[in-house]
Amino acid sequence: MISRLFAGMLLFCCPTIGFAQFLPRENSALHYTKALFTTLPKAGATDYQFEVAKGVWNIEDSFKRYRILTASSTSSTIICDLPEFGASYTWRVSFGKSEKTEFHHFSTLKSPFVDTTLYRLRILKQATTYKDAYVFLDGTRTLYDLKGKPIWFLPDLGGIISETAIVRDLKTTSRGTITFLLGEISSQQLFEINYDGVVLWKGPNTGEVSGDTSEFYHHEFTRLDNGNYLALGSEFVDVHQKTSATGFSRPANTVREGAQAVNNPSLSRTQFGTVIEYDASGKVVWSWKSSAYFLSGNFQFEKTEGRPMRYNTHENSFYFDSKDSLLYLSFKNISHVVVVKYPQGEVVQDYGKSVVPFGSKSMHNTGFNIDFGNGLFCGQHSCKISGKGNLYMVNNNSCDTSARSEAVMFRKTGNNATGLERIWRYTESPDPTMPKVFSIGGSIIELKDESMFVLLNKIAIVSKSEKALWNAVAEKWNADLQKWDNALQYRASIIPTVSDFERLIKFK
Protein backbone atom coordinates (compact mmCIF):
# COMPACT_ATOMS: atom_id res chain seq x y z
CA MET A 1 0.00 0.00 0.00
CA ILE A 2 1.22 3.47 -0.84
CA SER A 3 0.51 6.28 1.59
CA ARG A 4 1.55 9.91 1.84
CA LEU A 5 3.68 9.61 -1.26
CA PHE A 6 4.79 12.43 -3.49
CA ALA A 7 3.76 15.06 -0.92
CA GLY A 8 4.83 18.44 -2.14
CA MET A 9 6.32 17.01 -5.37
CA LEU A 10 5.76 18.47 -8.83
CA LEU A 11 3.33 21.14 -7.70
CA PHE A 12 1.80 23.67 -10.07
CA CYS A 13 1.40 27.23 -8.85
CA CYS A 14 -0.11 28.46 -12.09
CA PRO A 15 -3.82 29.27 -12.61
CA THR A 16 -6.04 26.44 -13.80
CA ILE A 17 -7.60 28.45 -16.63
CA GLY A 18 -8.61 26.07 -19.42
CA PHE A 19 -8.85 23.07 -17.09
CA ALA A 20 -12.08 21.36 -16.20
CA GLN A 21 -13.30 22.15 -12.67
CA PHE A 22 -12.13 18.71 -11.60
CA LEU A 23 -9.42 16.56 -13.16
CA PRO A 24 -9.41 13.66 -13.78
CA ARG A 25 -12.91 14.12 -15.16
CA GLU A 26 -15.72 12.04 -13.70
CA ASN A 27 -15.72 8.49 -15.10
CA SER A 28 -12.87 9.26 -17.48
CA ALA A 29 -10.55 6.47 -18.65
CA LEU A 30 -6.89 7.48 -18.63
CA HIS A 31 -4.10 6.01 -20.75
CA TYR A 32 -1.49 7.11 -18.23
CA THR A 33 -0.62 6.61 -14.56
CA LYS A 34 1.15 9.92 -14.00
CA ALA A 35 -1.92 12.12 -13.72
CA LEU A 36 -2.81 15.75 -13.22
CA PHE A 37 -5.32 16.35 -10.39
CA THR A 38 -7.18 19.66 -10.26
CA THR A 39 -9.93 20.93 -7.98
CA LEU A 40 -11.71 24.25 -7.66
CA PRO A 41 -9.50 26.84 -5.96
CA LYS A 42 -10.75 27.73 -2.49
CA ALA A 43 -10.39 31.24 -1.15
CA GLY A 44 -7.83 31.40 1.63
CA ALA A 45 -6.80 27.75 1.30
CA THR A 46 -3.06 27.08 1.63
CA ASP A 47 -3.16 23.30 2.08
CA TYR A 48 -4.95 21.04 -0.40
CA GLN A 49 -4.90 17.37 0.60
CA PHE A 50 -5.44 15.16 -2.48
CA GLU A 51 -6.56 11.66 -1.52
CA VAL A 52 -6.83 8.68 -3.88
CA ALA A 53 -8.33 5.24 -3.17
CA LYS A 54 -8.23 2.17 -5.36
CA GLY A 55 -11.73 1.09 -6.39
CA VAL A 56 -15.06 2.86 -6.85
CA TRP A 57 -16.37 4.20 -3.55
CA ASN A 58 -18.96 6.67 -2.30
CA ILE A 59 -18.83 5.75 1.40
CA GLU A 60 -16.32 7.31 3.78
CA ASP A 61 -15.27 4.10 5.56
CA SER A 62 -14.67 2.21 2.29
CA PHE A 63 -12.75 5.10 0.79
CA LYS A 64 -10.46 5.33 3.82
CA ARG A 65 -9.95 1.55 3.89
CA TYR A 66 -8.68 1.48 0.29
CA ARG A 67 -6.93 4.83 0.24
CA ILE A 68 -3.50 4.46 -1.38
CA LEU A 69 -2.30 8.03 -1.68
CA THR A 70 -2.43 11.30 0.20
CA ALA A 71 -0.47 14.19 -1.28
CA SER A 72 -0.28 17.78 -0.11
CA SER A 73 -0.20 20.86 -2.33
CA THR A 74 -0.25 24.59 -1.70
CA SER A 75 -2.34 25.06 -4.85
CA SER A 76 -5.42 23.42 -6.35
CA THR A 77 -3.34 21.35 -8.80
CA ILE A 78 -0.87 18.51 -8.31
CA ILE A 79 0.69 15.65 -10.29
CA CYS A 80 0.49 12.20 -8.72
CA ASP A 81 1.67 8.72 -9.64
CA LEU A 82 -0.98 6.00 -9.74
CA PRO A 83 0.13 2.44 -8.99
CA GLU A 84 -1.14 0.60 -12.06
CA PHE A 85 -2.92 0.49 -15.39
CA GLY A 86 -6.26 -1.29 -15.71
CA ALA A 87 -7.66 -0.16 -12.37
CA SER A 88 -10.49 1.99 -10.97
CA TYR A 89 -9.88 4.91 -8.62
CA THR A 90 -11.80 7.31 -6.37
CA TRP A 91 -10.43 10.66 -5.29
CA ARG A 92 -11.28 13.81 -3.39
CA VAL A 93 -9.64 16.88 -1.87
CA SER A 94 -9.69 17.93 1.80
CA PHE A 95 -9.31 21.48 3.10
CA GLY A 96 -8.35 21.57 6.74
CA LYS A 97 -9.83 19.01 9.14
CA SER A 98 -13.46 18.84 8.09
CA GLU A 99 -14.18 20.37 4.68
CA LYS A 100 -13.97 17.95 1.75
CA THR A 101 -15.06 17.76 -1.87
CA GLU A 102 -17.40 15.07 -3.09
CA PHE A 103 -15.98 11.77 -4.32
CA HIS A 104 -14.80 11.66 -7.95
CA HIS A 105 -14.14 8.54 -10.01
CA PHE A 106 -11.95 7.50 -12.94
CA SER A 107 -10.07 4.49 -14.25
CA THR A 108 -6.85 3.67 -16.10
CA LEU A 109 -6.88 1.67 -19.33
CA LYS A 110 -4.94 -1.45 -20.24
CA SER A 111 -2.60 -1.92 -23.18
CA PRO A 112 -0.22 -4.75 -24.09
CA PHE A 113 2.47 -2.11 -24.57
CA VAL A 114 2.47 -1.22 -20.85
CA ASP A 115 2.03 -4.81 -19.71
CA THR A 116 5.50 -5.50 -18.33
CA THR A 117 5.06 -9.24 -18.86
CA LEU A 118 4.91 -8.54 -22.61
CA TYR A 119 7.07 -5.44 -23.10
CA ARG A 120 9.67 -3.88 -20.89
CA LEU A 121 12.43 -1.29 -20.78
CA ARG A 122 15.23 -3.13 -19.02
CA ILE A 123 17.65 -0.76 -17.31
CA LEU A 124 21.30 -1.71 -17.78
CA LYS A 125 22.84 1.31 -16.05
CA GLN A 126 20.88 3.45 -13.59
CA ALA A 127 20.81 7.21 -14.13
CA THR A 128 22.75 9.52 -11.86
CA THR A 129 21.93 12.60 -13.94
CA TYR A 130 18.63 13.28 -15.72
CA LYS A 131 16.95 11.04 -13.12
CA ASP A 132 13.68 12.93 -13.63
CA ALA A 133 13.70 12.49 -17.42
CA TYR A 134 11.25 10.42 -19.48
CA VAL A 135 11.74 8.65 -22.78
CA PHE A 136 9.34 7.98 -25.65
CA LEU A 137 9.84 4.79 -27.68
CA ASP A 138 7.93 4.75 -30.95
CA GLY A 139 8.09 0.97 -31.48
CA THR A 140 6.13 0.40 -28.28
CA ARG A 141 4.37 3.85 -28.43
CA THR A 142 5.06 4.22 -24.70
CA LEU A 143 6.51 6.85 -22.34
CA TYR A 144 8.82 5.50 -19.63
CA ASP A 145 10.63 7.00 -16.67
CA LEU A 146 14.35 6.30 -16.42
CA LYS A 147 13.75 3.43 -14.02
CA GLY A 148 11.87 1.60 -16.77
CA LYS A 149 8.35 2.19 -15.49
CA PRO A 150 5.74 2.80 -18.22
CA ILE A 151 3.61 5.83 -17.38
CA TRP A 152 1.76 6.65 -20.66
CA PHE A 153 0.81 4.90 -23.88
CA LEU A 154 -0.56 6.22 -27.15
CA PRO A 155 -4.37 5.73 -27.06
CA ASP A 156 -6.41 4.56 -30.03
CA LEU A 157 -7.72 8.11 -30.67
CA GLY A 158 -11.27 6.93 -31.02
CA GLY A 159 -10.45 3.83 -33.05
CA ILE A 160 -7.89 5.41 -35.39
CA ILE A 161 -4.90 3.48 -34.00
CA SER A 162 -4.92 -0.31 -33.82
CA GLU A 163 -2.50 -2.41 -31.79
CA THR A 164 -0.70 -3.44 -34.99
CA ALA A 165 -0.42 0.06 -36.48
CA ILE A 166 3.05 1.44 -37.16
CA VAL A 167 3.93 4.49 -35.06
CA ARG A 168 7.06 6.50 -35.82
CA ASP A 169 8.91 9.57 -34.57
CA LEU A 170 6.93 9.95 -31.32
CA LYS A 171 8.18 13.10 -29.56
CA THR A 172 7.18 16.31 -27.80
CA THR A 173 7.06 19.83 -29.20
CA SER A 174 8.30 23.08 -27.65
CA ARG A 175 4.76 23.99 -26.61
CA GLY A 176 4.15 20.71 -24.76
CA THR A 177 2.28 18.62 -27.33
CA ILE A 178 3.11 15.29 -28.98
CA THR A 179 3.69 14.61 -32.69
CA PHE A 180 4.06 11.33 -34.56
CA LEU A 181 3.54 9.55 -37.87
CA LEU A 182 0.98 6.76 -38.09
CA GLY A 183 0.41 3.99 -40.61
CA GLU A 184 2.11 1.92 -43.26
CA ILE A 185 5.00 3.46 -45.19
CA SER A 186 2.81 4.11 -48.24
CA SER A 187 -0.01 5.72 -46.27
CA GLN A 188 1.37 7.44 -43.20
CA GLN A 189 -0.51 10.29 -41.55
CA LEU A 190 0.73 13.22 -39.45
CA PHE A 191 -0.74 13.84 -36.00
CA GLU A 192 -0.31 16.31 -33.18
CA ILE A 193 -2.07 15.44 -29.91
CA ASN A 194 -1.93 16.47 -26.27
CA TYR A 195 -1.12 14.27 -23.26
CA ASP A 196 -4.81 13.35 -22.97
CA GLY A 197 -4.91 12.09 -26.57
CA VAL A 198 -6.94 14.95 -28.05
CA VAL A 199 -6.09 15.44 -31.74
CA LEU A 200 -4.92 19.03 -32.21
CA TRP A 201 -3.68 18.89 -35.81
CA LYS A 202 -3.58 16.38 -38.67
CA GLY A 203 -1.64 16.61 -41.92
CA PRO A 204 -3.91 17.41 -44.89
CA ASN A 205 -2.21 14.86 -47.19
CA THR A 206 -3.77 16.30 -50.36
CA GLY A 207 -0.95 15.51 -52.79
CA GLU A 208 -0.50 19.19 -53.59
CA VAL A 209 3.30 18.89 -53.50
CA SER A 210 3.74 15.34 -54.78
CA GLY A 211 1.29 15.83 -57.66
CA ASP A 212 -0.29 12.52 -56.69
CA THR A 213 -3.21 11.31 -54.58
CA SER A 214 -1.11 11.46 -51.39
CA GLU A 215 1.97 13.21 -50.04
CA PHE A 216 3.40 9.82 -48.96
CA TYR A 217 4.61 11.14 -45.61
CA HIS A 218 7.50 9.22 -44.09
CA HIS A 219 10.23 9.10 -41.45
CA GLU A 220 10.02 12.48 -39.71
CA PHE A 221 7.46 15.12 -38.71
CA THR A 222 8.19 18.16 -36.53
CA ARG A 223 6.29 21.14 -35.21
CA LEU A 224 8.50 24.20 -35.61
CA ASP A 225 8.85 26.83 -32.91
CA ASN A 226 7.02 29.34 -35.14
CA GLY A 227 3.88 27.15 -35.05
CA ASN A 228 4.28 25.68 -38.54
CA TYR A 229 4.80 21.99 -39.30
CA LEU A 230 7.57 20.38 -41.36
CA ALA A 231 7.27 16.88 -42.82
CA LEU A 232 9.07 14.59 -45.21
CA GLY A 233 7.09 13.33 -48.20
CA SER A 234 7.72 11.59 -51.51
CA GLU A 235 7.45 12.39 -55.18
CA PHE A 236 7.48 9.62 -57.81
CA VAL A 237 9.14 10.50 -61.10
CA ASP A 238 9.75 8.35 -64.18
CA VAL A 239 13.41 8.44 -65.18
CA HIS A 240 15.47 6.66 -67.83
CA GLN A 241 17.47 3.80 -66.37
CA LYS A 242 20.84 3.13 -68.03
CA THR A 243 22.49 -0.28 -67.84
CA SER A 244 25.43 0.14 -70.20
CA ALA A 245 29.00 -0.27 -68.99
CA THR A 246 29.75 3.43 -69.39
CA GLY A 247 29.45 3.69 -65.65
CA PHE A 248 27.41 6.89 -65.43
CA SER A 249 24.58 8.47 -67.29
CA ARG A 250 22.66 11.49 -66.20
CA PRO A 251 18.88 10.98 -66.15
CA ALA A 252 17.17 12.39 -69.21
CA ASN A 253 13.63 13.11 -70.37
CA THR A 254 12.10 12.96 -66.92
CA VAL A 255 8.35 12.59 -67.17
CA ARG A 256 5.44 12.26 -64.83
CA GLU A 257 3.97 8.88 -64.05
CA GLY A 258 1.46 7.84 -66.70
CA ALA A 259 1.08 6.23 -70.09
CA GLN A 260 4.70 6.86 -71.09
CA ALA A 261 5.92 4.79 -68.17
CA VAL A 262 3.69 1.90 -69.18
CA ASN A 263 4.66 2.02 -72.85
CA ASN A 264 8.37 2.67 -72.43
CA PRO A 265 10.25 -0.09 -70.60
CA SER A 266 13.35 2.09 -70.27
CA LEU A 267 11.49 4.33 -67.83
CA SER A 268 11.44 3.45 -64.17
CA ARG A 269 9.16 4.99 -61.55
CA THR A 270 11.57 6.30 -58.93
CA GLN A 271 11.00 7.73 -55.48
CA PHE A 272 12.45 11.13 -54.60
CA GLY A 273 12.02 13.06 -51.37
CA THR A 274 10.03 16.18 -50.64
CA VAL A 275 9.92 18.53 -47.68
CA ILE A 276 6.61 20.25 -46.92
CA GLU A 277 5.94 23.12 -44.55
CA TYR A 278 2.35 23.68 -43.42
CA ASP A 279 0.87 26.47 -41.38
CA ALA A 280 -1.59 25.81 -38.56
CA SER A 281 -4.51 25.81 -41.01
CA GLY A 282 -2.91 23.05 -43.11
CA LYS A 283 -1.92 25.35 -45.98
CA VAL A 284 1.34 24.56 -47.80
CA VAL A 285 3.60 27.60 -47.21
CA TRP A 286 6.88 26.14 -48.52
CA SER A 287 8.17 22.98 -50.15
CA TRP A 288 11.33 21.50 -51.61
CA LYS A 289 11.84 18.55 -53.98
CA SER A 290 15.02 16.50 -54.05
CA SER A 291 14.33 15.56 -57.68
CA ALA A 292 15.08 19.16 -58.71
CA TYR A 293 18.58 18.74 -57.29
CA PHE A 294 19.35 15.13 -58.12
CA LEU A 295 18.01 15.30 -61.69
CA SER A 296 19.61 18.66 -62.47
CA GLY A 297 22.62 17.09 -64.17
CA ASN A 298 24.98 18.23 -61.44
CA PHE A 299 24.66 15.02 -59.49
CA GLN A 300 25.81 11.57 -60.68
CA PHE A 301 24.23 8.41 -59.32
CA GLU A 302 25.75 5.09 -58.39
CA LYS A 303 26.21 2.57 -61.19
CA THR A 304 26.95 -1.03 -60.26
CA GLU A 305 27.87 -3.87 -62.54
CA GLY A 306 24.86 -5.64 -64.02
CA ARG A 307 22.41 -3.23 -62.43
CA PRO A 308 20.66 -0.06 -63.55
CA MET A 309 21.54 3.32 -62.15
CA ARG A 310 20.32 3.53 -58.55
CA TYR A 311 18.32 6.70 -58.07
CA ASN A 312 16.41 5.85 -54.87
CA THR A 313 18.23 8.14 -52.48
CA HIS A 314 16.01 7.34 -49.45
CA GLU A 315 15.45 10.66 -47.71
CA ASN A 316 15.16 9.73 -44.02
CA SER A 317 15.63 12.73 -41.72
CA PHE A 318 15.80 16.51 -41.57
CA TYR A 319 16.87 19.24 -39.20
CA PHE A 320 15.81 22.88 -39.56
CA ASP A 321 18.41 25.33 -38.28
CA SER A 322 16.27 28.42 -37.69
CA LYS A 323 19.28 30.48 -36.61
CA ASP A 324 21.04 30.19 -39.96
CA SER A 325 17.94 29.41 -42.06
CA LEU A 326 19.37 26.10 -43.25
CA LEU A 327 17.65 22.75 -43.75
CA TYR A 328 19.79 19.63 -43.34
CA LEU A 329 18.52 16.55 -45.20
CA SER A 330 19.83 13.01 -44.85
CA PHE A 331 19.76 10.59 -47.81
CA LYS A 332 20.56 7.15 -46.48
CA ASN A 333 21.01 5.10 -49.66
CA ILE A 334 23.70 7.37 -51.06
CA SER A 335 25.10 8.43 -47.67
CA HIS A 336 24.74 12.14 -48.35
CA VAL A 337 23.72 15.04 -46.14
CA VAL A 338 22.44 17.92 -48.26
CA VAL A 339 22.16 21.46 -46.88
CA VAL A 340 19.41 23.66 -48.35
CA LYS A 341 19.16 27.42 -47.89
CA TYR A 342 15.69 28.38 -46.62
CA PRO A 343 13.49 29.70 -48.13
CA GLN A 344 15.45 30.01 -51.39
CA GLY A 345 15.69 26.23 -51.83
CA GLU A 346 19.26 26.37 -53.11
CA VAL A 347 21.62 23.51 -52.16
CA VAL A 348 24.58 25.21 -50.51
CA GLN A 349 26.47 22.14 -49.26
CA ASP A 350 26.51 18.41 -49.99
CA TYR A 351 28.46 16.14 -47.65
CA GLY A 352 29.13 12.89 -49.51
CA LYS A 353 30.82 11.59 -52.66
CA SER A 354 28.91 12.07 -55.91
CA VAL A 355 30.80 9.50 -58.00
CA VAL A 356 31.22 5.77 -57.42
CA PRO A 357 33.37 4.02 -60.08
CA PHE A 358 31.68 1.50 -62.34
CA GLY A 359 32.12 -2.08 -61.19
CA SER A 360 32.86 -1.14 -57.59
CA LYS A 361 31.18 -3.06 -54.84
CA SER A 362 27.95 -1.49 -53.66
CA MET A 363 25.50 -1.73 -50.82
CA HIS A 364 23.63 -4.34 -52.87
CA ASN A 365 26.59 -6.72 -52.87
CA THR A 366 28.65 -8.46 -50.22
CA GLY A 367 31.15 -5.62 -49.81
CA PHE A 368 30.81 -1.88 -49.66
CA ASN A 369 32.47 1.15 -51.15
CA ILE A 370 34.28 3.31 -48.61
CA ASP A 371 33.63 6.47 -50.62
CA PHE A 372 30.09 6.70 -49.28
CA GLY A 373 29.68 9.70 -46.98
CA ASN A 374 33.23 10.86 -47.73
CA GLY A 375 34.38 7.74 -45.88
CA LEU A 376 33.05 9.23 -42.63
CA PHE A 377 29.52 7.84 -42.46
CA CYS A 378 27.26 5.39 -44.26
CA GLY A 379 23.55 4.57 -44.04
CA GLN A 380 23.08 7.43 -41.59
CA HIS A 381 19.96 8.49 -39.68
CA SER A 382 18.84 11.44 -37.56
CA CYS A 383 21.23 14.16 -38.78
CA LYS A 384 21.15 17.34 -36.69
CA ILE A 385 23.15 20.44 -35.80
CA SER A 386 24.47 20.99 -32.28
CA GLY A 387 24.25 24.18 -30.27
CA LYS A 388 27.81 24.95 -31.39
CA GLY A 389 27.00 24.36 -35.07
CA ASN A 390 28.48 20.88 -35.41
CA LEU A 391 26.87 18.16 -37.52
CA TYR A 392 25.92 15.02 -35.59
CA MET A 393 24.10 11.83 -36.55
CA VAL A 394 23.66 8.10 -36.12
CA ASN A 395 26.18 6.46 -38.43
CA ASN A 396 24.97 2.94 -39.10
CA ASN A 397 28.26 2.04 -40.80
CA SER A 398 26.38 0.08 -43.48
CA CYS A 399 29.40 0.21 -45.80
CA ASP A 400 31.49 -1.93 -43.46
CA THR A 401 30.02 -5.18 -42.16
CA SER A 402 32.79 -5.45 -39.55
CA ALA A 403 31.98 -2.05 -38.01
CA ARG A 404 29.35 -1.23 -35.42
CA SER A 405 26.62 1.39 -35.52
CA GLU A 406 27.71 4.55 -33.73
CA ALA A 407 26.75 8.08 -32.81
CA VAL A 408 29.13 10.68 -34.21
CA MET A 409 29.69 14.43 -34.32
CA PHE A 410 31.67 16.36 -36.92
CA ARG A 411 33.16 19.82 -36.93
CA LYS A 412 32.71 21.60 -40.25
CA THR A 413 35.99 22.49 -41.88
CA GLY A 414 36.98 23.89 -45.24
CA ASN A 415 40.54 22.58 -45.25
CA ASN A 416 40.06 18.96 -46.22
CA ALA A 417 38.38 16.95 -48.94
CA THR A 418 35.41 15.87 -46.82
CA GLY A 419 34.49 19.22 -45.29
CA LEU A 420 34.09 17.45 -41.94
CA GLU A 421 36.30 16.40 -39.04
CA ARG A 422 35.05 13.89 -36.47
CA ILE A 423 35.26 15.24 -32.92
CA TRP A 424 33.00 12.89 -30.91
CA ARG A 425 32.04 9.24 -31.19
CA TYR A 426 30.03 6.75 -29.17
CA THR A 427 29.84 3.05 -29.95
CA GLU A 428 27.99 0.53 -27.81
CA SER A 429 29.95 -2.09 -25.93
CA PRO A 430 29.98 -5.41 -27.78
CA ASP A 431 26.91 -7.51 -27.09
CA PRO A 432 26.47 -10.88 -28.83
CA THR A 433 22.67 -10.59 -28.57
CA MET A 434 22.62 -7.35 -30.60
CA PRO A 435 23.37 -6.85 -34.31
CA LYS A 436 26.47 -4.84 -35.18
CA VAL A 437 24.63 -2.67 -37.68
CA PHE A 438 21.34 -1.13 -36.59
CA SER A 439 20.27 -0.12 -40.08
CA ILE A 440 16.50 0.24 -39.62
CA GLY A 441 16.65 3.52 -37.76
CA GLY A 442 18.39 5.17 -34.87
CA SER A 443 18.16 8.64 -33.37
CA ILE A 444 20.24 11.16 -31.47
CA ILE A 445 19.34 14.35 -29.56
CA GLU A 446 21.72 16.85 -27.95
CA LEU A 447 20.87 17.82 -24.36
CA LYS A 448 21.58 21.16 -22.71
CA ASP A 449 24.80 20.02 -21.04
CA GLU A 450 26.04 18.72 -24.43
CA SER A 451 25.49 15.10 -23.49
CA MET A 452 23.56 13.05 -26.05
CA PHE A 453 20.41 10.96 -25.94
CA VAL A 454 21.10 8.10 -28.35
CA LEU A 455 19.17 5.17 -29.81
CA LEU A 456 21.30 2.52 -31.48
CA ASN A 457 20.47 -1.05 -30.51
CA LYS A 458 20.13 0.24 -26.96
CA ILE A 459 18.91 3.58 -25.59
CA ALA A 460 21.48 5.68 -23.77
CA ILE A 461 22.40 9.07 -22.37
CA VAL A 462 26.03 9.65 -23.31
CA SER A 463 28.41 12.25 -21.86
CA LYS A 464 30.69 14.63 -23.72
CA SER A 465 33.51 12.25 -22.75
CA GLU A 466 31.75 9.48 -24.72
CA LYS A 467 30.64 7.49 -21.65
CA ALA A 468 27.16 6.06 -21.10
CA LEU A 469 25.52 7.83 -18.15
CA TRP A 470 22.36 5.71 -18.42
CA ASN A 471 21.35 2.97 -20.79
CA ALA A 472 18.59 0.46 -21.31
CA VAL A 473 17.22 -1.99 -23.84
CA ALA A 474 13.60 -2.33 -24.99
CA GLU A 475 12.42 -5.93 -25.02
CA LYS A 476 9.34 -7.97 -25.86
CA TRP A 477 8.43 -11.42 -24.59
CA ASN A 478 8.73 -14.26 -27.10
CA ALA A 479 6.09 -16.73 -25.93
CA ASP A 480 7.15 -19.41 -28.41
CA LEU A 481 10.77 -19.44 -27.29
CA GLN A 482 10.00 -18.37 -23.71
CA LYS A 483 12.59 -15.61 -23.74
CA TRP A 484 12.95 -11.85 -24.07
CA ASP A 485 13.82 -10.49 -27.53
CA ASN A 486 15.01 -7.03 -28.51
CA ALA A 487 11.96 -4.84 -29.31
CA LEU A 488 13.27 -2.74 -32.18
CA GLN A 489 12.47 0.94 -32.11
CA TYR A 490 12.71 3.26 -35.09
CA ARG A 491 13.30 6.38 -33.03
CA ALA A 492 13.36 7.41 -29.39
CA SER A 493 13.02 10.86 -27.83
CA ILE A 494 13.50 12.34 -24.39
CA ILE A 495 11.69 14.71 -22.03
CA PRO A 496 14.78 15.84 -20.09
CA THR A 497 13.43 17.91 -17.17
CA VAL A 498 10.54 18.20 -14.73
CA SER A 499 9.50 21.52 -16.26
CA ASP A 500 9.39 19.94 -19.71
CA PHE A 501 7.10 17.23 -18.38
CA GLU A 502 4.90 19.75 -16.58
CA ARG A 503 4.47 21.65 -19.86
CA LEU A 504 3.35 18.41 -21.49
CA ILE A 505 0.89 17.23 -18.84
CA LYS A 506 -0.85 20.57 -18.36
CA PHE A 507 -1.33 21.46 -22.04
CA LYS A 508 -5.06 21.26 -22.70
Image (cartoon, helix red, strand yellow):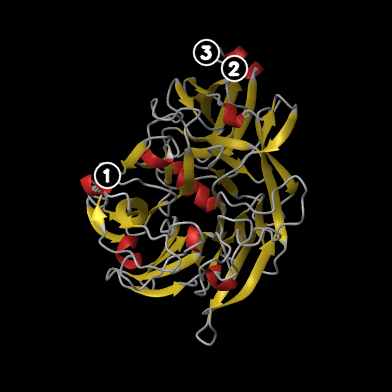
> Reading the chain from its start, which is encountered first: label 1 or label 2?
2
Q: How many marks?
A: 3
Secondary element at tag 1: helix
Q: Residues within 10 Å of mark 3 (few under 14, many from 20)?
A: few
3D distance between C-alphas at marks 1 and 2: 72 Å
Identified at 30% across, 53% down, the residue is 238
Secondary element at tag 3: loop
Q: Residues within 10 Å of mark 2 (few under 14, many from 20)?
A: many
* Image position, residue 231 (x, y; %): 36, 52
Q: Can you identify the residue that label 3 sits on?
A: 58
> Reading the chain from its start, which is encountered first: label 2 or label 3?
3
Q: Is residue 197 visible?
A: yes
The answer to which image quadrant residue 191 occupies is: top left
Residue in the foreground of this view, choosing between 347 and 402 = 402
Secondary element at tag 2: helix
Q: Is residue 227 visible?
A: no
Q: Can you identify the residue that label 2 sits on?
A: 63
- Residue 262 has which mark? 1
Q: Nearer the viewer, mark 1 or mark 2?
A: 1
3D distance between C-alphas at marks 2 and 3: 7 Å
Relative to 132, 227 lies left or right: left
As displayed, is residue 326 above or below residue 194?
below
